Amino acid sequence: MKTNRLVRGAAIAALYAILTLTLPAYGALQFRISEVMTLLAFFNPFYILPLTIGCAIANIASPFGIVDVIFGSLASFLALTAMSKTKNIYLASIWPAFFSFIIGLEIMFLSTEPVNFFLITGQIMLSEFVVVTIIGVPLMKFIMRNEYIERLVTQF
């Protein structure tokens, strides 16, 4: 069983990183399609660590480098943890947008151009809300209708 969990976690981390790295995912408007996967933490807290690791791997390619690896992954970790403790999927889906202020601060402090914290943070929050809540929740609800997938995601 431990090998199964390790392989599943590695596959989730790799899939998150690959989706993030192959699609435009950095800057003020971060429409990271990979963020839909954060909803897995709502169904099972097991996914918190693999998704955080996937985020850290993807953030290596960020223009802000190691700082984004640390603080971007922290924002993801906090959002994923909060999602796993929230009972309503719609409320859970808002946590990634909420913790986007960490990314807004990062961009404000590290950008070579002067940036407005509220504008940058608002743009990131909007992109997180669109991807996770508007696209992700209906998609996950549809996917979870399949009993096999639901069992695969929620049980170990």
Image (tube, rainbow, N blue to C red):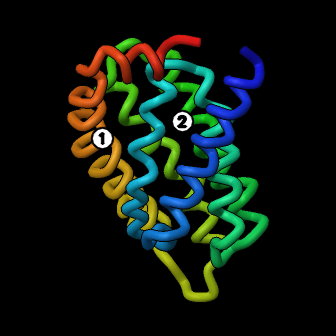
Percent across and percent down for residue 54 are 64, 49
Q: Residue furthest bottom?
A: 113
- Which residue carries the number 1 mark? 136
Three-letter code, disc 1: Gly
Which corner quadrant holds the N terminus? Answer: top right
* Alpha carbon separation for disc pair 1 and 2: 15 Å
At 61% from the left and 80% from the top, the residue drawn is: 111
Asked which secondary structure carries label 1, the reply is helix
- The disc label shown at residue 79, or none: 2
Snapshot quadrant of residue 121: bottom left
Percent across and percent down for residue 83 are 48, 26
Three-letter code, disc 2: Ala
At 55% from the left and 67% from the top, the residue drawn is: 21
Snapshot quadrant of residue 63: bottom right
Taking 85 as reference, is 14 left or right? Answer: right
Taking 63 as reference, is 39 left or right? Answer: left
Label 2 near label 1: C-beta < 8 Å?
Answer: no
Snapshot quadrant of residue 89: top left
